[in-house]
Image (cartoon, rainbow, N blue to C red):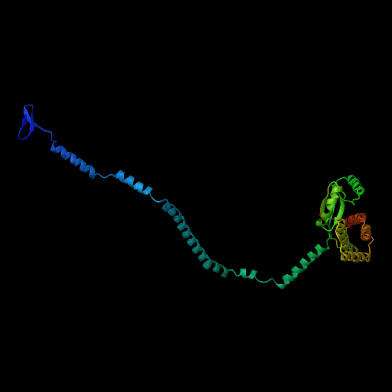
Amino acid sequence: MMDKHSRKITVKINGKERPFTTDKPKHIETNVNILEKEKEAEPRPYASFQQKKKKREKRSPITGAFNARIKPAIFSIAMAIMIGTGFGFIVLNVIPKQKAHSPQTLETALPIPMESKNSAKPAAKSANEAAAASFTVSVIQAGVFTDREAASAYARQLQSSSIPVVVVGEKQVALFIAVGNDKQQLQAINEWYKQKAHSTYIKSLSFANINSKRKPVIKAGETLYRQMAAISVILLGKGKVSIEDWKKLENHYQQIRSQTVPNDDDIKRYVSHMKTAYNMLIAYKTNQREELLQKTQQELLEALKSYIAVFPLRS
């Protein structure tokens, strides 16, 4: 039934009248309001964490790169200051003390006594004299043989081609086909010999210095020999010889003529071949025939062979 005054609807339940209206109970509204307030009052940690993370992610990349570079730079500067300070301390304190306690360093700077200087000069002088006294020349070698007969046969073959040659040695037999003062001098004619011989090789010869056998005629002959070897090689290479060099050649020849030749067969042959080589060279100066240069070289090679018999080659 409905009460007209209060507009309430009542129902009977189990014999008792109870109101039934459309209005919501107050306790429900109260509970709803309390829940809403509690939700508003609750902290939101997850949301705040995400926001902080986003803030971190939004940091400028330029700032990060700057921080990455500035830290190593600061560390390097600090290390440099520490190392520099330590080194300066050592220089200012440790090293002066060491110098003060080591007088030997001053002694090494003292000049060498005059006696030691004078004693060193004769040794150096004697070494230079020995080097100057030793006789050296260079030759073009056309092969080395273990069989002397084979070497002689090849030598005859070269002579038939108008190539001067001598056979030198016993166990190791070498063929020499040209002689000059040094290797560079022989390079000018080596190409021509390569066309005639199977193979060629330029080598230097140095002889043992035996003063007891180096008679005045030998010493004079060595100077003349080197000069004749140089002039003949220059002319074979189509070079020119000055008038002054020809005059020196004549003076050196007169010196060897004025010397007494000892009674030694090898030295006699040596001097004889030297004189013949000189005459051939002077003949070329007059006639300009190239075969005279080849004969000059042949006589010089024969003189060298006799010289080797007196003064053995250095190993």
Residue 268: image quadrant is bottom right
127 or 104: nearer the eye?
A: 127
Query: With 162 as the anchor, is 56 left or right in this view?
Result: left
Q: Is residue 250 visible?
A: yes
Quadrant where the N terminus is found in the figure: top left
Residue 90 pos. (x, y %) = 52, 65
Residue 225 pos. (x, y %) = 88, 60
Q: Is residue 279 visible?
A: no
Quadrant where the C terminus is found in the figure: bottom right
18 or 225: nearer the eye?
A: 18
71 or 107: nearer the eye?
A: 71
Query: With 286 as the anchor, is 82 left or right in this view?
Result: left
Residue drawn at 55 percent across, 69 percent down: 96
110 or 249: nearer the eye?
A: 249
Residue 263: image quadrant is bottom right
Tell me if residue 172 comes above or below residue 21 in the rendering. Answer: below
Residue drawn at 18 percent across, 41 percent down: 33
Residue drawn at 6 percent across, 30 percent down: 2
Residue 171 pos. (x, y %) = 86, 48
Query: With 155 as the anchor, is 1 left or right in this view?
Result: left
